[in-house]
Image (cartoon, coloured by chain):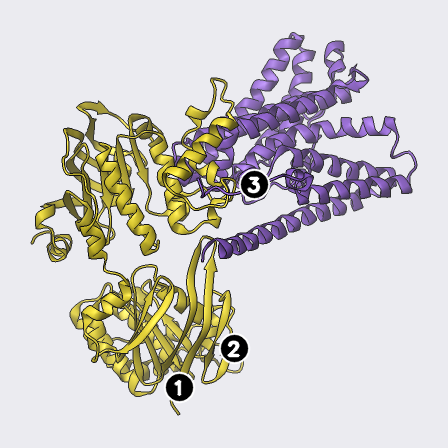
Chain colours: A purple, B yellow
Amino acid sequence: MSNIENKKEKKSILDIIGGDKLILIAAIIIVFALFTFLNKNFLTWTNMVNLMVAASLVGLVAVGHTYLIIAGQNDLSPGSLAAFCGTLAALLLSKDVPLFIAILIVLAAGVAVGLFNAWMVNKIKLEAFIATLVTQNIIRGFAYIICDGKPVSISNKAYLAIGKARFLTIPVSVWLMIIAFVVFGFILSKTKFGRSVYAIGGSKEAARLAGLNPQRIISVCFIIIGVLTALGGIVFSSRMNSGQPAANVNLEFDAITAVILGGVSFAGGVGDMFGTILGVILIQAFNTGLIMVNVSTFWQYVARGALLLFALTSDYIRKQRREKELLEASMRNIK
Amino acid sequence: MQSVLEFKNISKYFPGVKALDNICFKAYGGEVLAFLGENGAGKSTLLKVLNGDYQPTKGEYLLDGQQKHFHSPHEAIQEGISVIYQERQILLELSVAENIYLGRMPANKLGVIDKGKANRMAQEIIQDFGLPISPATKVKDLSIAYQQMVEIMKAYSRDNLKVICFDEPTASLSDAEIDSLFAVIAKLKAQGKIIIYVSHRMKEIQQIADKVAIFKDGRYVDTVVTKEVPEQQMIKMMVGRDLGDIFKNLDRNKKTGDVLLEVKGVSSDYVKENSFTLRKGEVLGFSGLVGAGRTELMRAIIGADRMKSGEVYLEGKKIVNRSPKEAMDNGIVLVPEDRKMQGILSNLSVAGNINIALMDQNANRLGIISSHKEELAAEKGIADFKVKTPSPDKKIVELSGGNQQKCIVARGIGTNPKVLILDEPTKGIDVGAKSEFYNMICEFAKQGLGVILISSEMPEVIGLSDRILVMKSLRIVGEVAREEATEDKLLSLGMMGEE
């Protein structure tokens, strides 16, 4: 057993959380401090709750993106899908479809779109970026078609409660996001499926030869993001009292930014759910903060673009650093 | 003045590999210097460092006393250093002249290209070379040998050409074509160019090279004058130790058992119909040239490629493998040839790589993995196969190639297979680790596994196998018993399909 030395090395907090995460936490603190300095109302309980509510939709989608991007895939369709699902729910309720059935149908739509994306990627061998760009447009189109382009208002009390009711002083929508983080975080780190997601993100062919089924794993990842996006669409429409076919543009943009900020590598195979949680907090604080200090909508676009550029740049730097560390490690290990 | 190319303390590391180790030597103008070494000895890597494709991790090199440092092959070419590769690097849709003057076509003051002038200039070079081709011919209409000549002419056309390197230039040339290539090389030599010639073929080296630089495991061994040192001694210098002894001393499995695996008429999109049997405790070698279909046959058997026809029987029972996973569950595992892309999962740790095929054993019914079971399995794999790693949590890419390969074998053996397929298992790993693998293979056979060994290294196949099947053009063309196997016999079967 002499090959395994210092197996039980003591782990410091830095090892457990990781240096990158500490930098991210520091960035969150700085953003919070900055906006609090600019607007005293930023760091209040009410605003924090509002911030988390606003984050819940991005958060749900970001959970899905965490899986997809680690698996080496991507999805540009959530914005359209969330709008479509919200509109579909409103429409079904307006036709007196029972609440439970309506929700099931909407979630099934999320599954169907996920399967469609997976089919394009697995069977037509399209790049996920292009495949889901197709879906983005088709689904946005259907969101308008089913309601004739007009928002559909919602009056079902139980449905409206999804976005507004509170449990232990925290809104249900926030609970949904927290549950998604915990459950999918656990699955990602502790189960066969989670392990398989990392493996195919490293190398699809090596993973297949090691006995995994990459196509099935990719399909499940697309279904997960489809269902979570549908759920997000339900929460959003409930909060808005209506299904809005034009809503949620750029939802995927925020979710992807959050995930990359959180340390998931665009190249696949690297990252975790804790990073995504931090990324979601950071991006929502950033978005809410910009509104609260009266930055114009136009400049908000520029700022978001800049934030994604920042996220991608730090992803690149992390990757360079990993490669350099690897090289140094092999120089030590190989005499 | 005679040109001098000097390598000073060049080292090149890749994650997991020390490809070049402190290389120091000189090459002189007007001489043909051959690089001799086994696969993975560092010859090609050194050429890539020379032409700026790779950056050396340490060290430098000097051309005529001036330190050179290139960021890309393009820069190197502009400074007069060209490498002619086995894979042609020319544009097939362009003409001979356009290829020769690519990126620097003669043009008038307005920037309009003067094709006529280019053709005239190219014609002069073609005459210099004495070739029967026209400068206006599209390169795709030329034979492979002439395509290579175009590449050489491209390098030659630069006035400042000082160093020209050939990396396995004769791999796909006929004898007559080789002769005309050598005539060109002789011409370049007469002009005082520094010529580096990389080849595996001793006969050619004897014919063309003035001196031979010998490499072994990323190290420079020595430079010898070709005429002064007998071939056998050069080979000994390049192999370092006599592999023959290693094979002689192997404790091989003496008795093979019942038929374990029966492959009947298996074909796929990539391989024709093939049949063979494998016994318990047997090491069955597969020999043949690269591209003969050995890997493809195995991929069809394990379901990595779709099987178009044929049947596979394991212990007399028919099995169907629609995916590598099904093959694994049936008891057949493959250790793939391309370790970097198909073997290791580069983003995972040593433990993660060993455990990836063992998740069914390590997880409960809900699919939740027991980290305790994973730790045990990883430690067992590391101990059983003597993987040298600082800890199971280290990234697998930090290990040496040989240790990475041990992890892949540990992963496969962990699934308790009946048949183990090893595809070029010792490719690119050092001699010490190689002999460990040889012992390992004998041990597997003794435990009753059926081992299929694909290897392009003749001594390896001959030294380890009980029987050797030879493939050519996607088909098994012959079987040679261990006692009768010689390199010549396998080679002629592999090339001609007959002895």
Amino acid type of disc 1? Ser
Mark-to-mark CA distance, 2 and 3: 49 Å
Circle 1 sits on which residue? B3
Q: Badge 3 sits on which subunit?
A: A
Viewed as shown, does residue B31 lie left or right of A80? left
Viewed as shown, does residue A217 lie left or right of A277? left
Kindly indicate the quadrant of the structure image that contains residue B252. top left
Q: Badge 1 sits on which subunit?
A: B
- Are discs 1 and 3 less than 8 Å apart at CB? no
Q: Quick one: SS at disc 3?
A: loop
Amino acid type of disc 2? Gly
A324 or A331, nearer to the observer: A331
* Residue at the extreme front of the image, as rendered: A2
Q: Badge 1: how crowded within 10 Å, few (<14), some, or many (20+)?
A: some
Mark-to-mark CA distance, 1 and 3: 50 Å
Q: Quick one: SS at disc 2?
A: loop
Amino acid type of disc 3? Val
Q: Nearer the viewer, mark 2 or mark 3?
A: 3
Kindly indicate the quadrant of the structure image that contains residue B122. bottom left
Circle 3 sits on which residue? A270
Q: Position of residue B465 (x, y in %)?
A: 18, 44
Q: Badge 3: how crowded within 10 Å, few (<14), some, or many (20+)?
A: many
Q: Position of residue A45 (x, y in %)?
A: 86, 27
Viewed as shown, does residue B431 lie left or right of A253? left
Q: State the mark number for residue B271.
A: none
Quadrant into which the N terminus of chain B falls: bottom left
Circle 2 sits on which residue? B111
B162 or A149, nearer to the observer: B162
